[in-house]
Amino acid sequence: MHYAVPIFVVALTIPAFFLLARGGFVAFGWPQRGIRILVAVILLASAIGHFLQPAFVAALIPPVFPFRYALAIVSGICEAAGGIGLLLASTRRIASLWLAVFMIAIFPANIYIAGKMIGPLHMPSVAVRGLMQIVFVALILLGGWGAPIIRKKTTA
């Protein structure tokens, strides 16, 4: 599977989110807090998996990448730091932007395992996994920045 197209499509989520928000962002209360907590829990659980089973996680990384075991550990550290950063008011926005970019950076591993059996689990296709990644990136950005305020064009 060619990696560039699905990575590019998922990466468009970030500029699309900020282009929609030409009017800025608005916090949306407890649903936004809930999104942040949900995303942080997912990231922290994933990070724990990276630390407890680094060889398993390393096997999910495409062989073209060197030092896959180290990458598994480092990506776990990044996920944990990002999850914690989302929960802190002072780092929420930068953590969400960094996590969105990080989710694009690790997407090749999702493409690599797409359609394969990993233990008892059948991994989703590239298209389904791409949609899942778009939704996750959008949730990360919504949790950190709030809802985009979409300005309507005015005619003069």
Image (cartoon, rainbow, N blue to C red):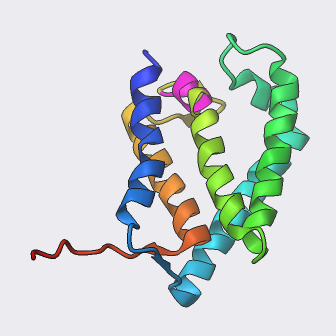
Extreme-top residue of the structure:
64
| 122 vs 34: above or below | above
Q: Position of residue 134 (x, y in %)?
A: 45, 49
| 45 vs 142: above or below | above
Q: Residue at x 72, y 67 (%)?
A: 86
Left or right: 57 as drawn, with respect to 100: right
Q: Residue at x 43, y 15 (%)?
A: 2
Q: Position of residue 103 (x, y in %)?
A: 61, 43
Instruction: Say which of 75 and 150 sits in front.
Output: 150
Q: Main secondary structure of the magenta part?
A: helix
Q: Quadrant of residue 44?
A: bottom right
Left or right: 133 as drawn, with respect to 21: right
Left or right: 68 as drawn, with respect to 143: right
Q: Which residues are magenta?
A: 109-114
Let me know if residue 111 is in the magenta part. yes
Let me know if residue 10 is in the magenta part. no
Q: Quadrant of residue 92?
A: bottom right
Instruction: Say which of 140 and 147 sits in front.
Output: 147
Extreme-bottom residue of the structure:
29
Q: Residue at x 52, y 34 (%)?
A: 123
In the rendered image, the quadrant that contains the C terminus is bottom left
Extreme-left residue of the structure:
156
In the rendered image, the quadrant that contains the N terminus is top left
